[in-house]
Image (tube, rainbow, N blue to C red):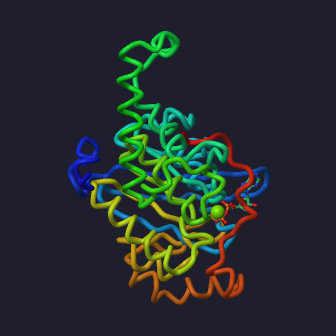
């Protein structure tokens, strides 16, 4: 499979706005986790989202992907305001991975990807029950496409391995394959390199570039600054729910306020994954 042939349908004109968040605010009781954030993503672009722990990055992702209905503001994806329903968001062409990996541990790597793929098949319950020719054709297509995606993320050799037995870095890549299986136009990655060693991180970087090269837009949350600044076309830095700065990696990197925002949380926190603040997410994306 060539990288481009896989996503021809979803590759639109580069540069066109695919996602627009307008004045998005999310409050939990008295706490404003996301405060009037504006954000634009274009096709073929890799956007980075950074900020110290608790800055509101995951909450903002949850607003973008329909897990949360923002307290105010709106999210426009591919020209339409999205309903706050994760499944409809996936059908519209937005897919994500989670800060805390959410795989089906007792299913194989291939089956995990197939789960993502089923949302694009038209097999109805009746066809599934009688398991007629259409069911078998669909099933074969789903299986083949899922295997292609495993190959694409570098997990072609893990087809029959149980997801829970895969090393951590591979589980993250498997989640990406499952997200890609939904044929997204935009993929959102929440800390894709958390827990990865430097070699796996380099592979993840290369994978994100290949995903972008197939015509997708990518939004990525990461604490690893080298990863973010190498990878992204633009970077948004959130601090206490507000936009501190948005700009090119060079602009963001050289802004003393960004360094200051991280120093407040200690230098280790700037590179370590944040595991605590993710427990409240709702349903699966696939
Ligand atoms: N479901 C929730 N209910 C209440 N507070 C929440 C919820 N989700 C996140 N928060 C709070 O919102 C703030 C932002 O959290 P989060 O978006 O997870 O930050 P980040 O991903 O940048 O580390 C934190 O203070 C967190 O405790
Ligand atoms: Mg988070």
Residue 31: image location, x then y, percent: 75, 58
Residue 137: image location, x then y, percent: 35, 23
> Which residue is painted at 63% across and 81% down in the image?
270
- Name the foreground residue: 244 vs 231: 231
**Quarter residue 61 falls in:** bottom right
> Which residue is painted at 43% across and 40% down in the image?
182
Q: Quadrant of ligand 1?
A: bottom right
> Which residue is painted at 54% across and 64% down in the image?
192
The C terminus lies in which quarter of the figure? top right
Residue 275: image location, x then y, percent: 72, 65
Left or right side of 270 for 160:
left
> Which residue is painted at 49% across and 44% down in the image?
110
Residue 30: image location, x then y, percent: 79, 55
Asked if 141 appears above or below 235 in the picture, the reply is: above
In the image, farthest residue toward the right: 30
**Quarter residue 122 falls in:** top left
Left or right side of 14 for 222:
right
Q: How many tags in the picture?
A: 0
Asked if 112 appears above or below 278 in the picture, the reply is: above
């Amino acid at each position: 499979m060539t990288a481009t042939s896989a996503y021809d349908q979803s590759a639109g004109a580069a540069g066109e706005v695919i996602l627009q968040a307008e004045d998005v605010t999310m409050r939990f009781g008295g706490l404003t986790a996301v405060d009037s954030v504006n954000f634009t993503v274009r096709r073929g672009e890799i956007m980075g989202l950074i900020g110290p722990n608790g800055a509101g990055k995951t909450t903002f992702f949850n607003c973008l992907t329909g897990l949360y209905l923002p307290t105010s503001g709106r999210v426009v994806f591919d020209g339409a305001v999205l309903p706050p329903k994760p499944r409809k968001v996936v059908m519209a062409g937005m897919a994500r991975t989670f800060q805390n990996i959410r795989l089906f541990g007792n299913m194989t790597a291939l089956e995990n990807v197939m789960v993502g793929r089923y949302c694009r098949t038209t097999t109805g319950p009746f066809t599934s029950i009688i398991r007629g020719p259409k069911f078998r054709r669909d099933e074969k297509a789903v299986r083949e496409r899922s295997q292609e995606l495993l190959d694409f993320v570098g997990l072609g050799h893990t087809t029959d391995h149980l997801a829970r037995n895969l090393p951590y870095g591979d589980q993250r890549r498997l989640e990406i394959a499952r997200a890609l299986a939904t044929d997204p136009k935009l993929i959102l990655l929440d800390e894709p390199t958390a827990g990865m060693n430097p070699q796996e991180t380099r592979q993840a970087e290369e994978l994100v570039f290949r995903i972008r090269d197939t015509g997708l837009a990518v939004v990525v949350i990461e604490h690893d600054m080298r990863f973010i600044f190498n990878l992204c076309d633009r970077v948004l830095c959130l601090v206490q729910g507000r936009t501190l700065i948005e700009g090119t990696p060079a602009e963001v990197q050289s802004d003393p306020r960004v360094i200051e925002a991280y120093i407040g949380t200690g230098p280790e926190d700037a590179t370590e994954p944040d595991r605590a603040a993710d427990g409240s997410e709702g349903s699966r994306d696939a």
